[in-house]
Amino acid sequence: MDQVIDVAVNYPLYQTFKYSVPSKLGKAIIGKRVLVPFGKKTVIGVVVKKEKHIKKDEINYVLKPIIDVIDDNPVMNLEVIKICSWASEYYEYPLGQVIFGALPSQLKKGVAIENIKVFENQHKELKTDKLEIDLNDEQNSIFKKIIQDTDSFSTSLIHGVTGSGKTEVYIKLAKEILRKKKQVLIIVPEINLTPQTITRFEMYINENIQSYHSGHTLKEKMTTWLGVKNKKLDIIIGTRSSIFLPFRSLGLIIIDEEHDSSLKQQEKLRYHARDLSIIRAKNLNIPIIIGSATPSFESLYNTRLKKSKKYNLTKRYYKTDLPNITLVDLTKDLPEDGISKLLKGEISKNLKNKKQTLLFIGRRGFSHALTCLECRWISKCKVCESFMTYHKNQKLLKCHHCGNSRSISINPGKCEKCNLVPVGFGTQRIEDKIKGLFPDAKVARIDSDAISNLRKLRDFINRAKNNEVDILIGTQMIVKGHDFPNVSLVGIIDVDSGLFNLDFRGLERTAQLITQVAGRSGRKNEKGHVIIQTRSPEHPLLDVLLSKGYEDFAFESLNDRKKANLPPYTRLCLLRMLSSKKITAFKFLDEIKYSFSAQKSIFFLGPAEAPISKINNMYVHQLVIGSKNRVVLKKITQKIRQYIIQKKPYNIKWSIDVDPIDLY
Ligand code: ADP
Ligand code: ZN
């Protein structure tokens, strides 16, 4: 009897396909690529399972034989197939597409692995004069506790204040794992953070370290993929997709900045690299360490459930105190173009003392929108119906959601001549104001308009470090993991948009932002000062965060999440649908809700318009499905997915997002 195998193909289909293997082709082992007949086509598939004993009557059709076996050796080992299968199942995404997504582009085609060009000697000459790490007492005690059981699965959360030196703890742990001839994977949220993390590892570590992210060429990625598989590479420092690399003998996973939302992929397979890493570590029976100065509420909650151990680094390595924080009540200290008197005075003092100032503002561009004071016209995007940001220098209105842009007419509204004013503040507006207030200061803006690539970012960071800039003005880009040792004053221009954010994670994000931004000040030599401008200084978040700190704030907020039936006390699944007629998707979502509403232990939110309500001329609606019970939710979403496939009107596009991070 011929061997029977299950094959995954690169199509959006929620199943694998059985084929027989003619004996002349030898054995088609799991993880090898095969050529199979598929409809009228011949396609490439990956063998994911071997069917041992299939009885004739179990299959009521004649199995087609495969055409060829492409590989001599598997391109994917069982362990990688296992994590792909888990992701496929958990995130409701077709297995074939997960598997092909985990293969380097060159292997997605039928080329034999031996014929693919890679860089020889990607690994460098190893120097041996590396520094020894000398941990301080707090770092050392955490290192000692974690290193005790690194031979089996465990999750450890390191909550270390900014500047406490989490990275040095990671490095020392990594060194121990390398000593056992195992590999280490470090996942960071952004490409921007990989070079500086690599530099720090290379100071102490002699083995082969390689980065892995979307900035690499296909050939580089292929080389790294092979290097990991052949164990020519010992340490990978990469972004979220490195979780799918085929490590030969992985011994430790580290997720840095585990709270960062870029760890979650927002399209196609909507996976969270931290959560997937925990599953992979469990499968491999190895430890995983997740670290942050502002851990996600989920991760803190898991420490309470004892699913994960918690370690705290409470002191900064360079013994500077955490900064003083002052709230400015903008209803009393009336701001002039976004800058209060107090902030202006402090900046001016700082300039006299030749110290650096960092101003944080959540939005790039000049203002959130333009409006006419007479007829109340407001700049809205015709494509997606979001507000359009005013970009003064280019005299354009730009939509940051969909990328649409247009020039500004003199008379967009109903008036004879509109009286247009900007609403809200963007980085450019603050930059204009600051340059007006302090004409002699060297001002630099950092946002994705000003800094379009890694080289420019590095250049900017170097200028800031060399004291060639007096005032740095920037968005999130400025906050993420970058060290500005000379900054002693930080201003958060407008915290209110975060405090009154609709999304249930709005407060968590805002607390993380305040804490992270504050952590950028006074890092090396002296105590810093943070000024937060707000119209609601009595807001409970600010009060708890500033008086008791991030962790207390998190645990208090978790109580509110519990009362409101929100994650992590419930699990959510977000269903989005696009249709060219507004009503079509809405009606279909409503039909789904109605059809499943009799099910026990689940609840629905919506259907409603999605926050970005129009994409490519299609209207977007959403329905949230939730439950306290993960297994129940899983069963329902699976059924709903099948229902969609069977019953959906033909012109609807849809996606499922399990554990979504943004709802609104
Ligand atoms: P984290 O790694 O927690 O993000 P930082 O990067 O802010 O912390 O680290 C603070 C600074 O202290 C860095 O410049 C780091 O190199 C330094 N540092 C921390 N621990 C040590 C150590 N054990 N030996 C030498 N330098 C250290
Ligand atoms: Zn738009």
Image (tube, rainbow, N blue to C red):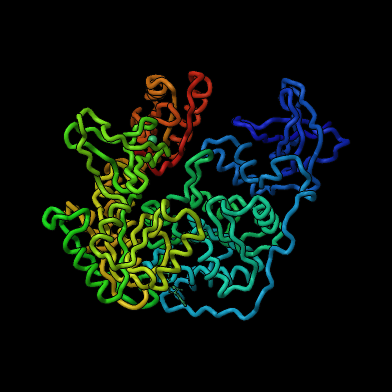
Q: Nearer the viewer, residue 271 or 530?
A: 530
Query: Does residue 267 appear to the left or right of 212 in the view shown?
Result: left
Residue placed furthest toward the left = 332
Ligand 2, seen in the image, is in the quarter at top left
Dividing the image into 4 quarters, which one contains the N terminus? Answer: top right
Picture coordinates of residue 486 (x, y %)? 36, 73
Q: Residue at x 39, y 31 (%)?
A: 383
**How many badges with numbers are in the image?**
0
Residue 619, by quadrant, is: top left
Dividing the image into 4 quarters, which one contains the C terminus? Answer: top left
Picture coordinates of residue 524 (x, y %)? 37, 76
Picture coordinates of residue 426 (x, y %)? 30, 50
Q: Is residue 181 above or below residue 259?
A: below
Residue 549, by quadrant, is: bottom left
Q: Residue at x 52, y 78 (%)?
A: 133
Q: Nearer the viewer, residue 480 or 377?
A: 377
Q: Is residue 556 visible?
A: yes
Q: Is residue 433 above or below residue 198?
A: above
Q: Residue at x 76, y 49 (%)?
A: 116
Q: Nearer the viewer, residue 437 or 647?
A: 437
Q: Is residue 163 above or below residue 534?
A: below
Q: Is residue 554 visible?
A: no
